[in-house]
Image (cartoon, rainbow, N blue to C red):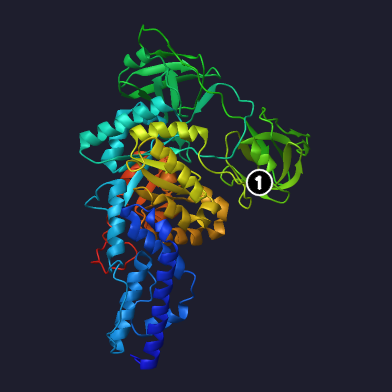
Amino acid sequence: MNTNPEELKAISNQIQELIAHLEIQEGAHAETLDGISQEYRASAKNLLHYGTLRNFDIRKLQKKMKRLGLSRFANAEGNILGSLINAHELIGKLGQNTKTTHPRDHLKIGGGKKLLKNHTKRLFGDQKEKRRVKVMVTLPTLAAHDYNLVLEMVQNGMDCARINCAHDGPSLWKNMVDHVRKASEETGKEVKIAMDLAGLKIRTGALEPGPQVRKFKPERSALGQVVHPAQITLVPDETEILEPYMLPVPKESIARLKGGDIIKLKDTRGKSRKLEVVQVTEEIAVLHAQKTLYVATGMLMYLANSKSAAIPIGHLPRTESFITLFVNDELIVSKKQEMGQFQVRAEDGQLVHPGKISCVPSVIVDKVKEGDPILFDDGKIEGVIDRVEPEQFVVRITRARTNGSKLKSEKGINFPQTDLGLSGLTEKDKKDLGFVAQYADIVNFSFVNTQEDVEELLVEMARLGVQDKVSVVLKIETRWAYRNLIKILLSAMRTKYVGVMIARGDLALEVGWKNMGKVQEEILSICSAAHVPVIWATQVLEGLAKNGLPSRSEITDISSSIRAECVMLNKGPYINEAIALLDEMLGNMEKLHDKKEGMWPKIELL
């Protein structure tokens, strides 16, 4: 080992200089630190230290430290000052200079990890024996009607139930909350409730809706054999929000059914169909169909071999219509909140007149510029703003599917390179926050962009008397939130307790797919420095939850998610299968890994 005294002295001086810079920055932000909750005071200091250290190029220092067999600070974001002080003292001992003095008020080695563990416990509850990483699950509308569904979710490993205020309404939210609390009590498992404020989501406006009809289709093999029958769930006709697999019928009709019953009907095409009742609860009945059928509002079903009255199908929502877009098509995006117009094409498929759709909120139309890129429907359709005209702008489509991409109403619009200057709480958010304050443990703050947004939320929470009772999860889903993350966290640390959700879907659109890996790593590092729990979200096991079969990339994604403190699953027909698999995988992987630390496990052959 090279222990040249001059080199050791140079390294010692460089580390001492870095420590001095950290102390200067801490003093410069003394006012900010005074407003931080005592629970996060040490974490806020370490976050400032991390931000300060990132302004220095320490690669040469790291190489010198490596040659001495000392830590290179590669994974030291959880305790910046403590790691520097520890390295400085070791260098002093190597150089036989033990007269080193350092600030007394700093985290000891391992202190950052302990704080993160405590903050995670405060946010999500006690750690389970077999796994550290928590599981958050988005509740479907059916969870408001089917208690057994929620009970199974809790039994399979759900630690936190997520309710999205962008959907359903207070009466259904209350049913979901009651079901979660009941399941938690019945199983003896702690389950937190998190509610998303909808936030300012930019979306496409209305299109003329289609007929009130639903299609149910079984899944078939390559040989045409039924692999999974079509599943139809009968729900009371007063149900406010209907999922695609639901049919509304009178509640008394459901009460008359029992497992094994056969229901007959003729669908909209006049084809005779038989449905088997496979499950009945107080609120719903689940039916299976072996053949495709189309069901419309007002249609009648009959219980086979029964003289009871017909079962009428209640009011179904109209089917979604869409504008089909091809590369080089034009699309008009209007400020006027009016029904959209479908495009007109010649017999050879050439566009005669472009389609037109409104933008919500309409003020967006006044903020865009020619040449700005624009994305529709989670990036499935890409375009560039070709012309800006009074009351509208014209988009030229640059990427779509070869056979055309369907643009429907209520689909997201992203402007990845445009500062729209819109953020903060909407009036709906403020109204919904009243419900959240009464019934939830956590509020998920959607589309936060700046520290001012956080301050606005905290003011509203203080007005409701829940600033230190309801925890806050910051959803990082825009490039502006990513750029302002340190300031956003420092503002949020005025309350307790805080988490961060990496909303990878919207964020990837904002920063670009090629940059998403780097951005994700940066967010993980910043949150590690702040000792703030991270939720790994968007499209986790999506194939399994929606289709019953995970992809290989989804399984690999789970291996990466273990670096977070929580993983979020979205709803789907196979959500309980997804929860059970995730619970098992996380438990198995945590025997092999500790967060960001290598271990040599005992080898077990499969």
Residue drawn at (60%, 24%) of the image:
210
Query: Residue at the spot x=28%, y=89% of the render?
Result: 96
Give coordinates of residue 79: x percent, y percent: 34, 67
Work out whether residue 594 can be spotted.
Answer: no
The residue lying toward the viewer, choosing from 36 and 149, is 36
User: Viewed as shown, does residue 239 lie left or right of 345?
Assistant: left
The quarter of the picture where residue 569 lies is: top left
Q: Quadrant of residue 175?
A: top left
User: Would you place residue 287 above or below residue 548 in this image?
Assistant: above
| Residue 467 location (% of width, % of height) | 36, 42
State whether residue 258 is above or below residue 539. above
- Quadrant of residue 376 in the image? top right
Q: Residues within 10 Å of mark 1 (few under 14, many from 20)?
A: few
**190 or 314: nearer the eye?**
190
The residue drawn where x is 32% and y is 84% is 91
Vertical placement of residue 119 versus 572, above or below: below
Of residues 181 and 376, the one drawn nearer to the viewer in this rendering: 181
Query: Secondary structure beneath disc 1?
Result: loop
Residue type, label 1 = Thr
Q: Is residue 451 visible to us here?
A: yes
Measuring 45% from the left and 47% from the top, which residue is drawn there?
475
Q: Quadrant of the C terminus?
A: bottom left
Residue 443 rendering spot, x and y as whole percentages: 39, 41
Work out whether residue 577 or residue 201 is closer to the camera in this orientation and state it: 201
From this view, report whether residue 122 is shown above or below residue 33.
above
Q: What residue is shown with label 1?
A: 402
Residue 218 in percent (x, y) is at 45, 32
**Numbered label tally:** 1
Which quadrant is home to the N terminus? bottom left
